[in-house]
Amino acid sequence: MNRAERIRVALQDGLDVQGIEVRDDSHLHAGHAGARPAGETHFDVLIVSPDFAGQSRVTRQRAVYALLSAEFEGGLHALSMRALTPEEAENETN
């Protein structure tokens, strides 16, 4: 299983996920700090969960980082994320 799949599984196991997109952006960071020739170091995640209701952006990010701690320990260098409630996600599409 590659890192994108492990990220997806970890988030789905830890949250009530109603939508998730995981994109490997490692190729955009070649030569930057933390980048590895094999990639799988820089990711972008969009996650939609009702679990985020009433939480600040920082609290949401901390929850995601906690679920992905093993990935960070194993070489994940950077994670860009948008953590939204279903209502917030719906408002973005309208």
Image: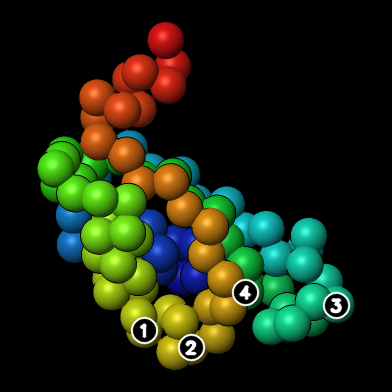
**In percent of the image, x 42 and y 21: which residue is there?**
92
As measured in the structure, the alpha-carbon distance from the residue carrying label 4 to the one carrying label 1 is 13 Å
Secondary structure at badge 1 equals helix
Residue pointed to by mark 1: 70
Considering only order in the chain, which callout, 3 or 1, is on the residue closer to the N terminus? Answer: 3
Residue pointed to by mark 4: 41
Kind of residue indicated by mark 2: Gly
Residue pointed to by mark 2: 74
* Residue 6 in the image, given as x and y percentages of width and height: 40, 68
Kind of residue indicated by mark 3: Gly
Q: Does any portion of residue 92 appear in the rendered image?
A: yes
* Residue 48 in the image, given as x and y percentages of width and height: 30, 40
Q: Is residue 24 left or right of residue 65?
A: right
Residue pointed to by mark 3: 31
In terms of depth relative to the viewer, which is nearer, 44 or 8? Answer: 44
In this picture, is 37 found above or below 87? Answer: below
Secondary structure at badge 3 equals loop
Q: Nearer the viewer, mark 1 or mark 3?
A: 3
As measured in the structure, the alpha-carbon distance from the residue carrying label 2 to the one carrying label 1 is 6 Å
User: Does the residue at mark 2 contact the one at mark 1 (Cβ under 8 Å)?
Assistant: yes
Q: Residue 59 falls in which quadrant of the image?
A: bottom left
Q: Which residue sits furthest top?
A: 94
* Residue 9 in the image, given as x and y percentages of width and height: 32, 61
**In percent of the image, x 25 and y 50: which residue is there?**
56
Kind of residue indicated by mark 1: Ala
